[in-house]
Image (spheres, rainbow, N blue to C red):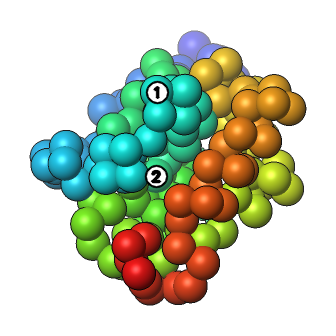
Amino acid sequence: MDMKKRILLILIAVAVVAQFIQPNRTAPTTDPTNDMLFMTQAPDEIKTLVTGACYDCHSYRTDYPVWAYITPMNFIIQDHINEGREVLNFSRWNEPSSRDEAHECGEEIEEGEMPPNNYAIMHGHAQLNASQRSSLVAWFNSNMTKKKGKSDRD
Ligand code: HEC
């Protein structure tokens, strides 16, 4: 066997073995009554939009696409999800630390920062048209606390 073939086979073997190395995707079970959309009694239209555009990264209700299981994408994607849950976690809205950035939601959507573009391109359910974007902005702005660390009932 020539050198090139041997190197190629080694690379393939490494890539195959790498597929068995997967990030930790386990999410804790949470009480559905602690969910942001439940707690705020969001209307159905808002529920659908927020679930489709934000929940994969900002809740424990993540739907993984098939490519999220391929090494090394899996680690990059999981890292991003962990970071998203860290700043804003709609699954444990009862905890003030999950809501620290809540006041930023409207602005982030308005500026087109959230959902991230590279994610929306790959997920039809996260693509917002102009009217969906403005109803989300209006809803977040009137339902999320303006000040950091305060609950939405303050
Ligand atoms: C693909 C994953 C992903 C999706 C989908 C997503 N986010 Fe994020 N979001 C992140 C990550 C990662 C961060 C933290 C790093 C950063 O600020 O970019 C973040 C940060 C934020 C912040 C904090 C802003 C800041 O700069 O500190 C807010 C507010 C936010 N997201 C709201 C939303 C809302 C609302 C949606 C849905 C419309 C959404 N995000 C959808 C991944 C996501």
**Secondary structure under the numbered disc 2 in the rendered image:** helix
Asked if residue 115 lies left or right of residue 62, the reply is right
Mark nearer the viewer, 2 or 1: 1
In this view of the protein, which residue sits in the foreground, 128 or 146?
146
Badge 2 is on which residue? 58
Q: Residue at x 46, y 27 (%)?
A: 44
* Viewer can see residue 39: yes
| Image quarter (top left, top right, bottom left or bottom right) of the N terminus | top right
* Viewer can see residue 73: no
Q: Position of residue 68 (x, y in %)?
A: 48, 31
* Crowding at mark 2 (Cα within 10 Å: few <14, some 14-19, many 20+): many
Instruction: Determine whether the beta carbon of the residue marked 2 sits less than 8 angstroms from the nearest atom of ligand 1.
Output: yes
Q: Which mark is residue 44?
A: 1
The quarter of the image that holds ligand 1 is bottom right
Q: Amino acid at mark 1?
A: Asp
The span from disc 2 to disc 1 (Cα, nearest Å) is 19 Å
Q: Quadrant of residue 13?
A: top left
Asked if residue 144 lies left or right of residue 122, the reply is left
Q: Residue at x 65, y 61 (%)?
A: 141
